[in-house]
Every structure is written in C-alpha cells, then in structure tokens.
Amino acid sequence: MESKHRNSSEVVVVLHGFAASPRWMTFLCRRVARTGRRVVNWGYPSWRRPIDLSGQDLLRTAYHLAKDESVERIHFLAYSMGSIICRAALLKDPQVPKLGRVVMLGPPNRGSHVARLLAPMFGWIFPVARELSTSPKSYVNGLPRMQGVEVGVIAGERDRVVRHNCTHLPSQREHLMMPLGHAGLLLSEEVTGAALRFVETGSFGFSQKAPETKAVVLSSWQVPATGTGVPLENG
C-alpha cells in the first residue's frame, strides 16, 4: 500500500489492544510509515494498570510530541482497548496542541460482552475486564462525550470480541463497518488504507454503501443516542 503522501511533519501514534504489546502492531506501523508519516508505536501495560492511568501516560506522550518543532499534527490510530485509553487521554485535555484526527479499530466504546463474561471470574486479577464490561456502570460506559475531536470508527461485522453495535461513539464523524473479525481489522490493508484516508481527509472515502467491499458508512447524525437504538448488551 504505497502512497505519494510524504509528510514527515505528521505523527501517527499507534496503540495496541488488551493482552498485547507494540509488537502486535508492527505490520500496521510499517504500512503507515510507507506513507511518509512518522509512527510512534506506543505501548502500555494492559493487564492490570487502570485505563485512566494509561490515559495520563498517553497524554504526557502527546505533550512531548507537541513540543517537537518539526511536528505539525499528531494523529491517533488505536486498536480495541487502545481506543478507550485514547478517549481517556483526550477527555482529560481535548485541546492537546497540534491534535489531528483519531481512528479507532474495533473499539469497545460501549464495552465488550467478553469482558463482561470474564469480569466476575477474573476481574480481581484483571481489573481492566470490569472497566471494559458492557455493564452500564463500567468505566467505559461512564466516560463523557468527546468534544472537539474528529473521530472515525471502523468495526468488524464478524467481530466476536466487540460487537459492532458497541463500537459506536455518539460524537463519531463516520462509522465504517467491514466484513471482518476483530483481528482482521488489524491485519487488513484495506482497513489501514481507510484509516489513513480519514487521517488525511476526515472521511474513510467510501460511499454510504459500497457493495464491492460490503462496507457501510454511517455519519454521526445517523447514530442513535445511547439507550435509544443501539442498546447495551444484557446478561
């Protein structure tokens, strides 16, 4: 996926998901780097460290990057749980200097039913499972609405870790659904291409319905408010 885009003044901060490490994001980072953008493959301890504390660490990283005079814009490309850490960081300060756009891949914005199943048994070992639960009282479902940040969400139609109706964010600019599973979102070059188009233009570059890719794009105004048309998981 080569690109004529050559702008090393743009930085893309890449975040991995739960029970992973930056190594999992290597191929994605290489695809982004081939476009000429600078890539920061940012890691965090995902097993036990609370999301809020990782959010603080990410915010400090953003401030550090913003001090670099050669950096003009800072974007975030976050996978799964990394998306929630990104939300936590930007909710603390949505006016991060040089902030660009945010793309979330398979984000548990309304929680993960898998986390909800694991929380009663393993929540004492992995408190993050409670934070990412679909329970209305979980950390992720208590986060306030994001303001002033352009966010694009890419969900997997076959995702069995985060159901696509739980990936929506009320303030999202666009929501793209692809015929992929959770890991497929990370491995797909087509997904990476769509994410980079959003970073550059604020749009995934698909029409509202694209039969050749079976992709469906929703604008923010089409997304029902929480509790109206996209319910939280029960049970």
Image (cartoon, helix red, strand yellow):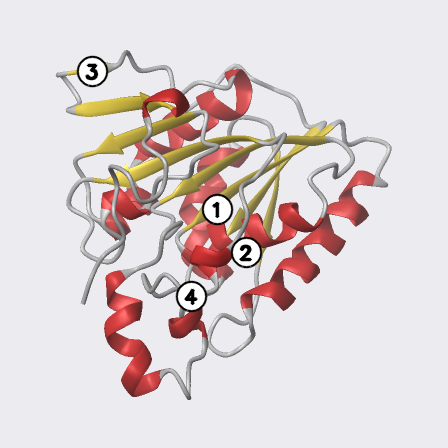
Q: Residues within 10 Å of mark 1 (few under 14, many from 20)?
A: many
The residue identified by callout 4 is 138
Q: Nearer the viewer, residue 89 or 42?
A: 89
The C terminus sits in image quarter: bottom left
Tell me how far mark 1 sits from mark 2, CA to CA.
9 Å
- Left or right placement of residue 216 versus residue 194 in this view: left
Residue furthest to the front in view is 228
Tell me how far mark 4 sits from mark 3, CA to CA.
33 Å
Q: Nearer the viewer, mark 4 or mark 1?
A: 4
Question: Is residue 16 shown to the viewer in this render?
Answer: no
Q: Counting residues from the N terminus, which is met first, the one under dot 2 or under dot 4?
A: 2
Horizontal and vertical percent position of residue 32: 50, 34
Q: Nearer the viewer, residue 47 or 191?
A: 47
Whether the residues at callouts 1 and 2 have beta carbons within 8 Å, the answer is yes
Q: Nearer the viewer, mark 2 or mark 4?
A: 4
What residue is drawn where x is 39% and y is 35%? Answer: 153
Whether the residues at callouts 1 and 3 have beta carbons within 8 Å, the answer is no
Identity of the amino acid at label 2?
Ile
35 shown above or below 165: above
Q: How many marks?
A: 4
What residue is drawn where x is 71% and y is 52%? Answer: 59
128 shown above or below 15: below
Give the quadrant of residue 100: top right
